[in-house]
Amino acid sequence: MRPLLVSALLLLTPSRAFFFHHPSVHGDSYSYKGDGDAPDHPESLFQPDDTFTDVTLENLDLSDVASLNLPHTIQKLSLIKCKLSAIPGEVHMLENLAELNLAENQLETFGGVFTSSSALTKLNASHNVLNSYNASFPLLTTLDLSANALTVFPNAVFASSQLDSFHISDNGFEIAAVSAAQYDFFAGLTDFEVGFADVSTCNSGSLVYLQGNGVCRLDVAAAEDPALVMRDHGTDKEEPPTPMATVGVVIPHLPVPSNSTKKYIIAAIIVLVVVGMIAGVLALISLGVVGGIARSVYDYIGRQLALAIRRR
C-alpha cells in the first residue's frame, strides 16, 4: 500500500525536486535551495500569476535551462551557485530589478543591456571567472567583483557615480597609481577592497600612501586607466615598474614627532609620575596611614632599646 501511495504522490508532483526539496515561500519572498542538480521541471518553479519581489535560487544546475519564467515583479534576485556561464536573457528584461546576486557561478563576461539598468543598486558577481566587465549602472551603490579573472581594471565601474561599497580584490592585477579623478572616486567609498602593488619608490613624482599601501603620485597628464601591474605569485617578486601615465593625489601624512618633541614628551611623563607619587603620599598622610606607620616603627625601636638596656 505504501509504495502505491508514494508513486501516486510522485505523479501528482510536477517536479521530483519539489518532492524532496520544497521551495520556501514567505509573503513576497521565494527561495529554493537544490542539491546541485537541474530541476526536473524548471517551468514549474513559478506560475504565471506569481508576484514575488524577492527570489533566491541556490545550488541548482541551470546551465541548460532555457527559461525560468521569472515573475516580472522581481526586485531582488539571487542565482547563487547555479552553474551559469551566461546571464539568462530574462534577467536582462526584469524592469524592477534593484538587487542582483550572481555569486559562485561560471560567468566569463558581464555586459549587455539591462532593462533595469536605471534601477539596479546592488550587484554581486564575485567568485566567477570574469575576464571583462562592461556594464553601466548609474545608480549602483554596492558592487562586488572580487575573486574573478580580471587582468585590467574595468573602466565601466566609474560610470557608477553613486557607488559606496566596491570589492575587486583577488583578481589578476594590482594598482600602482591612480589619477586625481580616480582617487576622488575611490576616496569617496566607505567600503573599498582592492589589491595594491605597494610600491616603495617612484621614478618621478612622489610616493604617497593609500589605505596603508604605497602608490605613486605623478605630476603628468593622466590617462583614464589606473596604473596596473600583474599580480606575481612567485617567491622572487620584483619591484613593480613606476607607472608613467597617471596622476595621483597626495594623501596627507600624520606629522612625525621630532627628537626635541620626543624629549619634551618624556619629560612631561616623568613630571606627571612624580606629581602622582607626591599626591599619593599626601593622601596617605591625610588619612593617617603614614603617621601610624611612623609611630609603629618608633615604638618598635624604643622597645628594642629598652630590652637591650635591661640585658646589660
Image (cartoon, rainbow, N blue to C red):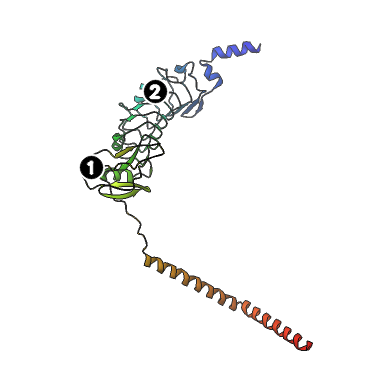
Name the residue nearer the viewer: 183 or 189.
183
Which amino acid type is marked by label 1? Answer: Ala
Question: Residue 116: x and y, percent?
Answer: 33, 29
Question: Residue 287: x and y, percent?
Answer: 61, 77
Per the image, the residue denoted by label 1 is: 222
Question: Residue 272: x and y, percent?
Answer: 48, 71
Do callouts 1 and 2 mark residues in contact (Cβ within 8 Å)?
Answer: no
Q: Secondary structure at mark 1?
A: loop
Q: For residue 175, what is the image quadrant? A: top left
Q: For residue 97, what is the image quadrant? A: top left
Residue 12 lies, with reference to residue 36, above or below; the image says above
Q: Residues within 10 Å of mark 1 (few under 14, many from 20)?
A: some
**The furthest residue to the left:** 221
Which amino acid type is marked by label 2? Answer: Ser
Per the image, the residue denoted by label 2 is: 85
Q: Secondary structure at mark 2?
A: loop
Q: Residue at x 73, y 83 (%)?
A: 304
Name the residue nearer the viewer: 111 or 202.
202
Question: Residue 66: x and y, percent?
Answer: 40, 17
Q: Quadrant of the N terminus?
A: top right
